[in-house]
Image (spheres, rainbow, N blue to C red):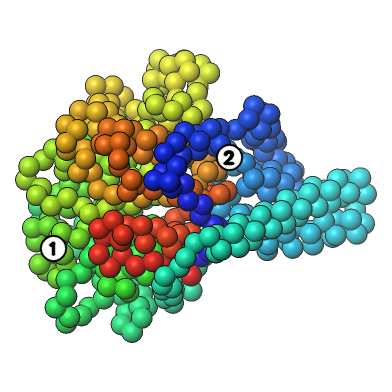
């Protein structure tokens, strides 16, 4: 899927790239007010849809919302949820034709002339908005293809059902590879509280496989090891010779830090037992995480830097829209709650993301915050240890309405300042107009090339289709 391009913010070429990114992605005041007006108008549109059976206003709000960033983390709740907007954005050409047809039908209808005419106006505006989204995407794709060099294109046949949504990989135990099917095996190792998913191609080749260790997202409460927006990428990498380990962790009812302990135990099993069972190379591991999984991956890396029993560190890290600042203490880029409510644990001007994390993950225990914030944990690590932090690639959309891209930019900036002034191996790939699910399926070919050039053997450039 290459319909969403990726623009590179190369911090090696631009030492102040992160600061510029923070400035560019902060909406101007008028855009911010317009976005809030759109968000409130969508509630009116949702009311018209539910009570009046008139979807025209709500569809117009959705078609306009793909051009702006819903204030994080409100993209996770109604009325303009990122999981809905991803379909409007990804299929904008189809919706442009659909809304155009509905507009013509409304204008030609013989019902209430005034009502039908107004409805036709809303559909026409929706059609124009989706058309503009399609045009902008095509222009960005052309620019990306001219500026990026794709070294290898890997195309694997996806099961048709998974084209509706990558979560539908959940129902498959094998998927097509190049010449041999990719096996998806669920394993429950002794000593682990949760199972693991392993993707690989059965082979008698004696060569050791590189490993991608993935921690799934889901707001620390949802998601599943096989229900991942990255599933098409996992299929392609497994078909290319990787061993994919998709890590599960305890969620509902789990007390922090059980989630992190489960991820650590899974990695320890991979190094001590799994590598020998699946002919994998424990010295060639890429640690990946998405959203909440990116938060856990960053904490896991911090733990590995300080833990003497882990002699082998991952050779690279790849994070998709990671929640690296769940308290939003460092960038102040999420919605602040304009009220206080002690029974709910809400303080005046408290970050909505902070409130969610404290209530759902920490169960209201504020004493656990220091152990749950990657940047605060990194501050405690010896500078010589931080210099061993592996090359890191972060893929983030600038329209992410759940986890703001400012968190990723600030994290890389801190990592550079704490590790060494000459650190050049980290990259932030910005997806223009990208929202979480679409970012996952639009992994740029350069992403894998970057990791490979900084130590990840056989991580070839991929163009997922």
Q: Are marks 1 and 2 in contact (CB under 8 Å)?
A: no
Q: Which residue is mark 2?
A: 69
Q: Residues within 10 Å of mark 2 (few under 14, many from 20)?
A: many
For residue 465, above or below residue 361: below
In this rendered view, identify the residue nearer to me: 397 or 161.
Answer: 397
Residue found at x 30% / y 61%:
452
Asked where in the image residue 135 lies, by quadrant, the reply is bottom right
What residue lies at 21% left-to-right and 40% top-to-bottom?
A: 387
* Residue drawn where x is 74% and y is 63% of the image: 97
Would residue 75 appear left or right of 122 to someone viewing this image? Answer: left
Q: Secondary structure at mark 2?
A: loop
Residue name at image x 16 percent, y 64 percent: 281
Picture quarter containing residue 449?
bottom left
Label number found at residue 274: 1
Q: Is residue 138 left or right of residue 271?
A: right
Labels 1 and 2: the sequence-earlier one: 2
Is residue 233 depicted above or below 255 in this figure? below
Query: In the image, which disc is placed on residue 353?
Result: none
Measured in 3D between alpha carbons, the distance from the residue under mark 1 to the one under mark 2, in whole angstroms, is 42 Å
x and y, in percent, of residue 143 in the image: 59, 59
* Relative to 108, 380 lies left or right: left
Instruction: Estimate the x, y position of residue 339 in percent, counting from the top left.
Output: 51, 16
């Amino acid at each position: 899927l290459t319909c969403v391009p990726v623009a590179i913010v190369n911090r090696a070429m631009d030492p102040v790239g992160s600061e510029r990114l923070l400035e560019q992605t902060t909406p101007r005041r008028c855009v911010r007010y317009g976005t809030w007006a759109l968000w409130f108008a969508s509630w009116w549109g949702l009311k018209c849809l539910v009570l009046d059976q008139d979807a025209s206003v709500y569809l117009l709000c959705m078609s306009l919302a793909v051009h702006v960033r819903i204030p994080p983390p409100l993209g996770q709740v109604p009325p303009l949820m990122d999981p809905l907007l991803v379909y409007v954005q990804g299929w904008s050409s189809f919706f442009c034709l659909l809304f155009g047809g509905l507009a013509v039908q409304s204008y030609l209808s013989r019902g209430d002339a005034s009502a039908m005419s107004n409805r036709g106006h809303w559909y026409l505006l929706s059609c124009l908005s989706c058309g503009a989204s399609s045009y902008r995407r095509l222009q960005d794709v052309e620019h990306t293809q001219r500026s990026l060099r794709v070294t290898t294109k890997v195309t694997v046949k996806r099961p048709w059902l998974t084209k509706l949504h990558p979560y539908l990989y959940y129902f498959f135990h094998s998927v097509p590879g190049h010449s041999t099917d990719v096996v998806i095996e669920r394993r429950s190792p002794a000593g682990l509280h949760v199972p693991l998913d392993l993707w690989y191609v059965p082979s008698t080749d004696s060569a050791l496989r590189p490993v991608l260790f993935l921690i799934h997202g889901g707001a620390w409460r949802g998601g599943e090891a096989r229900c991942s927006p990255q599933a098409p990428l996992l299929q392609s990498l497994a078909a290319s010779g990787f061993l994919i380990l998709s890590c599960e962790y305890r969620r509902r009812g789990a007390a922090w830090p059980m989630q992190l302990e489960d991820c650590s135990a899974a990695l320890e099993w991979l190094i001590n037992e799994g590598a020998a069972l699946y002919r994998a190379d424990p010295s060639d591991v890429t640690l990946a995480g998405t959203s909440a999984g990116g938060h856990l991956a960053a904490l896991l890396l911090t733990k590995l830097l300080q833990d003497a029993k882990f002699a082998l560190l991952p050779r690279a890290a790849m994070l998709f829209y990671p929640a690296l600042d769940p308290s939003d203490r460092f960038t102040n880029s999420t919605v602040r709650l304009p009220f206080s409510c002690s029974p709910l644990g809400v303080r005046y001007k408290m970050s909505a993301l902070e409130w969610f994390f404290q209530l759902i993950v920490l169960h209201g225990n504020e004493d656990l915050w220091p152990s749950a914030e990657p940047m605060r944990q990194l501050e405690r690590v010896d500078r010589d240890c931080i210099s061993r932090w592996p090359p890191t690639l972060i893929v983030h959309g600038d329209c992410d309405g759940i986890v703001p891209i400012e968190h990723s930019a600030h994290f890389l900036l801190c990592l550079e300042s704490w590790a060494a002034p000459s650190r050049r191996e980290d990259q932030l790939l910005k997806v223009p107009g990208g929202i979480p699910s679409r970012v996952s399926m639009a992994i740029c070919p350069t992403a894998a090339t970057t990791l490979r050039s900084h130590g990840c053997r056989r991580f070839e450039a991929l163009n997922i289709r």
